[in-house]
Image: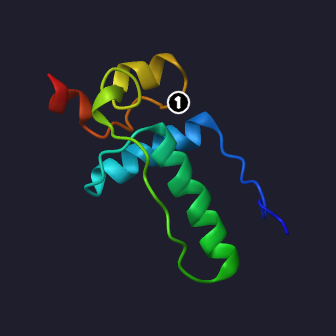
């Protein structure tokens, strides 16, 4: 019996951008949830069907990191001109 069918590797930048995209669609989640969503999306595409995914965290604790345009710029995760308007929401 296999307990793990596979592993999906995701980068920090992909995860952070995924969180911000989810936030634009009404799901204010953190990094663990962003990683779960990204991995589930890839698996769903391979399987050709839906995949149930649980989001284990929330986004409010990441207001100074993932959802901060300045933090994303200074850490190389986002280029100028690609803002999602999150800084204004936390001002």
Which quadrant of the view contains residue 47?
bottom right
The answer to whether residue 47 is left or right of residue 72 is right
Q: As displayed, is residue 85 above or below residue 42?
A: above
Which quadrant of the view contains residue 30?
top left
* Coloring basis for residues: rainbow
Q: Position of residue 71 (x, y in %)?
A: 41, 19
Classify the position of the C terminus by image quarter: top left
Between 42 and 55, the one lying in front of the other is 55
Residue at x-position 33% and y-position 37%: 59
Q: Residue furthest right?
A: 1
Label 1: state its secondary structure: loop
Between 31 and 18, the one lying in front of the other is 31
Q: Position of residue 15 (x, y in %)?
A: 54, 42
Between 52 and 87, the one lying in front of the other is 52
The answer to whether residue 27 is left or right of residue 44 is left
Q: Residue furthest bottom?
A: 48
Q: As displayed, is residue 40 above or below residue 90?
A: below
Which quadrant of the view contains residue 10?
top right
| Residue on which the image places disc 1 | 77
Residue at x-position 48% and y-position 47%: 34
Q: Position of residue 49 (x, y in %)?
A: 58, 83
The answer to whether residue 2 is left or right of residue 37 is right
Q: As displayed, is residue 50 above or below residue 36?
A: below
Residue at x-position 77% and y-position 61%: 3
Q: Position of residue 67 (x, y in %)?
A: 34, 31
Q: As displayed, is residue 8 above or below residue 28?
A: below
Residue at x-position 36% and y-position 44%: 29
Classify the position of the N terminus by image quarter: bottom right
Crowding at mark 1 (Cα within 10 Å: few <14, some 14-19, many 20+): some
Q: Residue furthest front?
A: 1
């Amino acid at each position: 019996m296999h307990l793990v069918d596979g592993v999906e590797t995701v980068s920090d930048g992909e995860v952070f951008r995924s969180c911000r995209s989810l936030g634009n669609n009404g799901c204010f989640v953190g990094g663990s949830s962003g990683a779960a969503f990204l991995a589930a999306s890839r698996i769903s595409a391979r399987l050709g069907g839906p995949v149930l995914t649980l989001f284990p965290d929330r986004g409010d604790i990441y207001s100074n990191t993932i959802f901060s345009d300045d933090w994303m710029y200074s850490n190389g995760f986002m280029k100028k001109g690609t803002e999602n308007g999150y800084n204004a929401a936390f001002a």
